[in-house]
Image: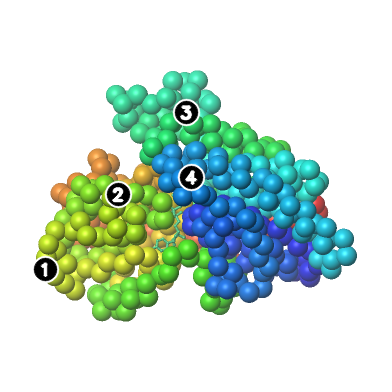
């Protein structure tokens, strides 16, 4: 798009894997539409520009956590420390970029930031710079978060343990237990405050971008447009990673993906492998780790398991596995610290994805037509999982925690039994829809056109 040549967009991702990936995918999409791209990043989970898209400029701001701060267990407190530390360095960086702008051939059109970076609104406003927000999670989970004040009023929040299985009638098929979004080690009230802040900061933006598509979350998008954000334009142009050029060899991974996954998958039968990964943040305890291991072993299926260092509390890696576990299973198991997940999900040997239902993982699985087993841990993951199992019906949820018998049964229901055949059919159908929306005239294709016009009008 010729008009976008000569305009620059500044993007500022939150320094977490699940937020970095979609923000940098969005940058790639906008670059393919002719915009110049500047990325601002912190030293917390610092990006490595040498592995990233060489067509962008990268600007680091000196924000890091001390050892004490990094070891704080409460994630809402850690987030507020990062936010407080970012304000001035971000202001200075933005000021530098904007003052270079005066004689620049590509003046800045807008900032695109993560709504959890709540200070970006006031800083952008102080420079009269339009700010668009990228919601890196889904639309349905945002609609649930935006309903928190109503849910408090109706008595669903704070949650009472005796009501966990109850349906939230205003948000069917969401159950009360799906509202347990607070991350471990934080006070639910503090978490609700962070969420409410995110919802409100988004209202005060020049637009809201989603990494989703109409055929997937049309109803939630309509609710968000009508009830929560009637005054700002909303764009749904996902799935980002399937949109725009795919040739770039750049990697946004903070950990190095272990390519041995692919050679191991090459030795396995079609659709036989259960791929297991709980993303970049979730943690499990020793007991859960062993239930997963035995459930997988007893299922009889081969499995590729991402055991991220730090996934198992108080362990360095997978040393809590019983003696001889790996030797006995031998070729039926492959464990890595980090996988090239999109490649793995696209591999013909993968038949199911046991996931924590982070939004990126959910979308990546949908795009490859891989049915899911869901173990949501916190935040948006509960709502994503409920949609996977009860709305799109492309997966099964472990409703009662992680127990080896249920794990084994669920894997077999999905990968061996007739029930699984129907789920797979629906997953393939949804994959078709994900492909279709990106084609000329499709909903995400048109929404991207709308976004480009909107940025140029700012
Ligand atoms: C976090 C939150 O937990 C999630 O709920 C929210 O939607 C986004 O932020 P995370 O837990 O890391 O994200 O999950 P997810 O959203 O699935 O993102 C993980 C990303 O890491 C995916 O893009 C996935 O492809 C990638 N990944 C994961 C790998 O590349 N290799 C792996 O081994 C595991």
Residue at the image point whose x is 78% and y is 53% from the top: 95
| Label 3: element kind | helix
Q: Is residue 143 in view?
A: no
Q: Earlier in the sequence, mark 2 or mark 1?
A: 2
Q: Residues within 10 Å of mark 1 (few under 14, many from 20)?
A: few
Question: In the picture, residue 263 is in which quadrant?
Answer: bottom left
Which mark is in front, 4 or 3? 4
329 on left or right of 430: left
| Label 4: element kind | helix
Find out whether the residues at labels 3 and 1 contact each other: C-beta distance under 8 Å: no
Find out whether the residues at labels 4 and 2 contact each other: C-beta distance under 8 Å: no
Q: Residues within 10 Å of mark 4 (few under 14, many from 20)?
A: few
Q: Earlier in the sequence, mark 3 or mark 1?
A: 3
212 on left or right of 332: right
235 on left or right of 319: right
Q: Is residue 233 above or below residue 258?
A: above
- The quarter of the rendering in which ligand 1 is drawn is bottom left
Which mark is in front, 2 or 1? 2
In the picture, the disc for residue 313 is 2
- The residue indicated by pointer 3 is 189
Residue 188: x and y in percent read 43, 31
- Whole-angstrom CA distance, mark 4 to mark 3, is 21 Å
Q: Residues within 10 Å of mark 2 (few under 14, many from 20)?
A: few
Residue 221: x and y in percent read 57, 44
- The residue indicated by pointer 4 is 69
Q: Earlier in the sequence, mark 4 or mark 2?
A: 4
In front of the other: 229 or 183: 183
């Amino acid at each position: 798009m010729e008009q976008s040549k000569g305009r620059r967009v500044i993007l500022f991702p939150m320094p977490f894997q699940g937020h970095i990936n979609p923000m940098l995918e969005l940058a790639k999409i906008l670059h393919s539409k002719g915009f110049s791209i500047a990325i601002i990043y912190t030293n917390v989970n610092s990006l490595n520009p040498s592995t990233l898209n060489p067509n962008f400029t990268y600007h680091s701001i000196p924000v890091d956590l001390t050892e004490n701060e990094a070891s704080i267990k409460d994630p809402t407190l850690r987030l507020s420390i990062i936010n407080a530390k970012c304000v001035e360095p971000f202001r200075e960086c933005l000021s530098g970029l904007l003052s270079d702008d005066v004689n620049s051939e590509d003046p800045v059109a807008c900032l695109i930031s993560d709504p959890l970076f709540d200070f970006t609104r006031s800083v952008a406003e102080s420079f009269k710079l339009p700010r668009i927000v990228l919601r890196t999670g889904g639309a349905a989970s945002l609609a649930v978060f935006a309903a928190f004040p109503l849910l408090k009023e109706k008595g669903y929040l704070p949650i009472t343990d005796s009501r966990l299985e109850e349906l939230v009638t205003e948000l069917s098929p969401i159950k009360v237990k799906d509202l347990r979004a607070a991350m471990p080690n934080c006070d639910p009230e503090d978490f609700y405050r962070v969420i409410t802040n995110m919802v409100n900061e988004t209202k005060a933006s020049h637009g809201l971008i989603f990494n989703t598509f109409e055929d997937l979350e049309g109803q939630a998008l309509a609710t968000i447009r009508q009830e929560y954000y009637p005054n700002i334009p909303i764009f749904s142009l996902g799935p980002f990673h399937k949109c725009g050029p795919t040739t770039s060899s750049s990697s946004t991974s903070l950990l190095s993906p272990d390519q041995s996954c692919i050679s191991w998958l090459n030795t396995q039968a079609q659709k036989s492998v259960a791929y297991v990964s709980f993303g970049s943040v979730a943690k499990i305890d020793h007991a859960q780790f062993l239930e997963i291991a035995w459930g997988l072993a007893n299922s009889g299926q081969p499995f590729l398991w991402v055991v991220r260092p730090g996934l198992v509390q108080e362990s360095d890696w997978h040393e809590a596995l019983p003696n001889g576990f790996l030797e006995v299973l031998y070729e039926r198991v492959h464990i890595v610290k980090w996988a090239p997940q999109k490649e793995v999900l696209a591999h013909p040997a993968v038949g199911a994805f046991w996931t924590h239902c982070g939004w990126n993982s959910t979308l990546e699985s949908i795009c490859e037509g891989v049915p899911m087993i869901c173990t949501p841990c916190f935040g948006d993951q509960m709502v994503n999982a409920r949609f996977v199992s009860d709305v799109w019906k492309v997966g099964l949820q472990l409703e009662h925690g992680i127990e080896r018998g249920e794990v084994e049964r669920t894997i077999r229901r999905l990968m061996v039994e007739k029930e699984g055949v129907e789920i797979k059919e629906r997953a393939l159908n949804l994959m078709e829809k994900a492909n279709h929306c990106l084609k000329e005239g499709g909903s995400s294709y048109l929404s991207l056109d709308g976004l480009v016009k909107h940025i140029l009008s700012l």
